[in-house]
Image (cartoon, coloured by chain):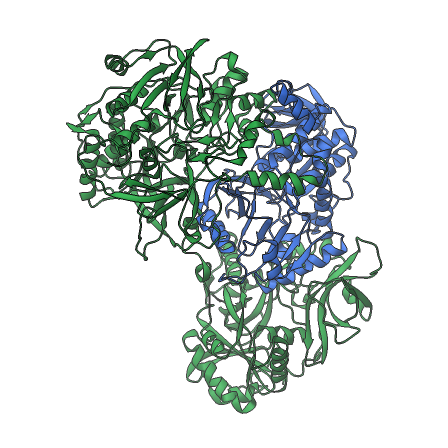
Amino acid sequence: MTGTYRVRRGDVAESRNAVHFTFDGKSYQGLAGDTLASALIANGVHLVGRSFKYHRPRGFVSAGSEEPNALVGVGATQSRYTPNLLATQVEIYDGLVAESQNRWPSLETDAGFLNEYFSAFLPAGFYYKTFMWPRTAWKKLYEPVIRRMAGLGKAPAEPDADRYTQVFAHCDVLIVGAGPAGLAAALEASNSDATVILCDEQAEMGGSLLSDRSASIDGMQAADWARAALDELRKRPNVKLMSRTTAFGWYPHNFVGLNERVTDHLSNPATNQPRERLWQVRAKEVVLAAGAIERPLVFTDNDRPGIMLAGAARTYVNRYGVVPGKQVVVFTACDSAYRAALDLKAAGARIQVIVDLRKSVSGYWVDKARAEGIKVRSDSIVRGTSGWLRVKSAQISNAQGGDAETVACDLILMSGGFTPSVHLFSQSRGKLSYSEELRAYVPGESVERERSVGACKGLFALESVIESGAKGGRDAAAKAGFPPHGERSYAVSAQSVGADAFIGSVMTDHQAEKRAWVDFQNDVTAKDVRLATREGFRSIEHVKRYTTTGMATDQGKLSNMNALGVVSKQIDVAVPKVGLTTFRPPYTPTTFGSFAGQSRGDLFDPVRKTSIHAWAEAQGARFEDVGVWKRAWYFPQVGEDMHAAVARECKATRESVGIFDASTLGKIEIVGKDAAEFMNRMYTNAWTKLEPGRLRYGVMLREDGFIMDDGVVGRMATDRFHVTTTTGGAARVLSMMEDYLQTEWPDLEVWLTSTTEQWSVIALQGPNARKVLEPLVDGIDLSADAMPHMSVREGRICGVPTRLFRVSFTGELGFEVNVPAGYGRAVWEAIFAAGKPYGITPYGTETMHVLRAEKGYIIVGQETDGTVTPDDAGLGWAVGKAKRDFVGKRSLSRPALVREDRKQLVGLLTTDPKVVLEEGAQIVLDPTHPIPVPMIGHITSSYWSATLNRSIALALVRGGRSRMGEELSIPMPDGVIKAKVVDSILFDPKGERLNA
Amino acid sequence: MQKFSALSLLRAGLTGHAGWQRQWRSPEPKSGYDVIIVGGGGHGLATAYYLASRYGVKNVAVLEKGWIGGGNTGRNTTIIRSNYLFDESAGIYEHALKLWEGLSQELNYNVMYSPRGVLMLAHNIHDVQSFKRHVHANRLNGIDNEWLSPEECKEFCPPLNVGGSMRYPILGGALQRRGGTARHDAVAWGYARAADALGVDIIENCEVTGIRRAPTGEVVGVDTTRGSINAKRIGVVAAGNTSTVMNMAGVRLPLESFPLQALVSEPVKPIFPCVVMSNTIHAYISQSDKGEMVIGAGTDVYTSYTQRGGLHIVNHTLDAICELVPAFRRLRMLRNWGGIVDVTPDRSPIVAKTPVSGLYVNCGWGTGGFKATPGSGEVFASTIAKDEPNKINAPFTIERFRDGAVIDEAAAAAVAH
């Protein structure tokens, strides 16, 4: 036993190890199994936080995940620091470092408390009414001040040192919550062949049973029965038990997100353990056994440290063995608080008085309290409290008013009844219905395959809780297709606490000016809620947004129902008519890292590399990201920058031979009797007459007539095409093809296969390309006559089967060698070796860009931007005018697409040949025009051309083809650049080189 | 209208805030109005306000099926910017931005427009080219937008992971300093209060169930859950439900509706000074005045009217955020929600007359409508009042999809709005 507030825990004989931790720099000792909250309470510490707006001192309200006040920062280092954790959930371990938040300079003396003095001027929504003058002061003055005051904890300053993983799972029955209902459900559901997952947010499963000293089940104390049930479940192979696991979100079709906290409670976690796991579970059937949350009472100054939910106090005493106070006032609207009072009394606390809102009180628990000599005042309220850093007294009067009696205390317990946790049910889009009897919403009609059992269904008597859990478990297993092997019965002995509840504010009409907190963390009082309704905010969504009630980190778990009650009374509209704010995931705040999972750094997106990648890497290539691919960008030699490297690569290719890895191009094999017809419909070009053995440059449009993709296509046989796409477009082209094939033209006999990764593609370009290749090739005549430009042959290269394209994206004599990817590197190296005598030079994408720009070849995504037609890009020749139809054909004749002043692709040569234009620069006719300056186009590509010894550019210019020779202006921030419009083909316009 | 000011707040504070009046009335619908606006979101309320304040049309009702501002106005991530590429888009978004700059004062309601800067990150060479094209075009259109090197990005937004081990490293960014955020709810309420003061009837819980037309075709009124209401002019501004509402008048629009999700973290002390958008890795983020990280991404893949989306979208949004700011990995998601966005084929809006006489439509803002709210309302009001489009919204017709004069920002830059 440590600390003056330690008592024996329940009836369990035990020895718990001492655990040392610090809070705000001070060392404390707790016991194994404590939460930070129970350990601090054991040491008499109740002041743990400050409220959001008024910075009022705050203590523990609850013992669970609904806690609004006790938010702490945990972590000894910034790389493992987590703000805003709930002290009621943090499990202590040796060396734990925790601190309070949102206070300066210290928790006891917080300067932010000045707000409290001005609170009369800071009602709900005050910031909408002021801070408007002068106009720029909001950003410069008011907002920065407000921001500094706002926020709770501090975000960690360093990258997270921990890892997170994700797991996908299927099960027949998922049970959320391992309290009495959930345990019974699990026992029954797993008494079948169904696979069952039982999860619970707490460290120890058992829920309310762990705090129950009075009930017994099957002749055992409640907590012992829970442990026995868990032992039994643990032995069943079809059951998976998951503690510290919160079902945080329901997504369509019984898809439930679980967050499992793996290491946060450990002093020295194994390094191979992730901090958290995100489980994405598809469950055939779900049993919701989420329990209920006790409702605070809204009375004057109900927010002081030492004012706590009655059930929470009971948990601290019975489960953790700490008494939260020694002089206790109880304020209640239901019987359960009596039970809590009796448990505290048994632990040695003095119960000063039980103040009951109800006019007449009776029943087992009331009688028992009276029998034990506890004073009970019915039809009474706590109308005020005193105490600054800890509550000191309660003022008690009749419910209607009258004289108040002051009673000294260090703890006030409150209970307004229980609110069923319908969060997940509501997220599943099940309909809620309002129970007048329970003054709460309960699950109505289900939409998904789930059922609520126990307290989250509005059942509070232990016997019916267990009965409904058992039935729900059997039902779920049966509905999942696994009828249970039998039924068991449960002998429950427990005295009912009834189901009385209160909603709204308990204040008398004379107390309108006093403050009673509805939302503790966000400092929303009943007065604020009433003000909102007076100002016309009557929908509960408006009240929430105007006052911020329910928007704190507990997301209204404690406040929503009371806010509804206050609004209902104020505007005299029944609670269900006022509405209800939407329940949204997550049930409790959930770590970003767990959603991100392993997706970080290189695992963020797959890195695709060609079979030749490692060779390029060894050569010192620089790479660029193109889609998910890494592509060799340029191959700098010692002392070269990109500019020098590219100039050298260009020159070598134009003068002798260059070698380029084109493997990233998308490839699709299109096969079938209707393959040519399919190609006719997908591409603008005509394919019927393309003979096997020939290549054609194809253009593909979207439905709206704009260029989507392009690529060279080889006809391998009458019923077989080898299609290439852009590197980035491969997936979307195949998707579009499949979409059309499956939905529009299912009659066509065509099969599509992605072969992007099956082929390595080695481009060999330059006047000596043929000479390099010829000795390596078997069975293919490479001569110009036998294999002209734009043809394809099948044969072997270096003994490996190849589809050899004669094609050029550089304007030079060129080949693209397709070989099975497994041979790519070997064939590349063989070609490279054979090219040595010719000074063969590897080049990257940048040189490829320059060479093709010199020839006026477009790159989709650079010359095109989704608004460019084939004719705009100078590709009108590629559109089969006589074709009956193709994707985008109808759109091409739309009025805006046939206008003569459309932006057209042209070449641009700067007046000063040394000036390289900036890609993306805008083109104007009159640079002296005042802003806005009418723009007629932009630079799409711009490079230094070593070949031409000057700069070159391609541009889209309004009516560009009719402006040949015209001088245009490119206004830059530091001056206007002049350039002349020329044809887009700047090098070898007759194509003599590529036909060589 | 009661004047809001520091002084009035002070005075009210001394008297227990008893004197505050309703910010807008809750009138019963009249039998008829000159103009009915269908949809009480930001755009609809702004339209009503500008009809009354600038175009002299005061006999106006705004019909809202739920509570005002409850659609995308109350669900978006509140990003404001105008650095669009094409002249047409730049025109309408810059019109809006200029109105944002004085909106709190004009409405006498603090909408908290905060020009904190919107930084759009480039992660590959294509991004760099595209953003520079924007920067040049914006400069000539008189819209601020500047290119920042990776180091300058880091200086402007210190938490960013620049030079780290990102799969797609930050290669620079385009910054619009006048861009920023505003308080979304306040925009709806501010317009509602100001419009109400000018005589506009804002009628909540009033769902339009039919659009009535004369035998000659023109509109004559609407049927609602609160009875029939006459009007010669009807403006439909019902994002997320435009197709269904317009269908009541027999008008089919080229719209698809998708869920768009957003989420917030728990509040933390100020750490993130601006808005950062990264379209290549799909995420955007800013920090609210309250301290929450406000985060969004692209739409879900499938069309839907349910205001929620898939968990995998959240996963991909947050993995991108954690890459951009690895220190945020330990922050926690507090709330995640969805709205429904209406998307046109070119992802630009339709603000136009329709084939039905007296029926006007303002829709198709996709994922980027909030930033346009004041401008959209102003030009739509002008269009309704004058029965012809304003110069600014003239390009945003329905007919452009027939004629091909599309305004395709997204295709042009792979940029989400």
Q: Between residue A498 and residue B416, name the one nearer to us.
A: A498
Q: Is residue A350 visible?
A: yes
Residue A246 in the image: state x and y as whole percent: 35, 40
In the depicted structure, whether residue A161 falls above or below residue A980: above
Q: Quadrant of the C terminus of chain A?
A: bottom right
Viewer-proximal residue, A107 or A568?
A107
Q: Residue furthest left?
A: A219
Asked where in the image residue A982 lies, by quadrant, the reply is bottom right
- The percent position of residue B396, horizontal first and vertical second, equals 71, 45
Rendering colour (chain A): green
State the residue lying farthest toward the bottom. A837
For residue A573, say whether it is visible: no
**Where residue A645 appears, x then y in whole percent?**
60, 79
Q: Is residue B257 left or right of residue A871?
A: left
> Residue shown at 51%/27% (left/top)?
A524
Indicate whether A965 appears above or below A786.
above
Q: Which chain is blue?
A: B
Count of all numbered marks drawn on residues in the image:
0
Residue A344 coordinates in the image, percent (x, y): 28, 24
Frontmost residue, A836 versus A876: A836
Residue B204 versus residue A441: which sits nearer the camera?
A441
Residue A205 sits in quarter? top left
Where, quadrant-wise, is the N terminus of chain A in this rendering? Answer: top left
Residue A319 is left or right of residue A977, and the answer is: left
Indicate left or right for B66 with A752 as reference: right
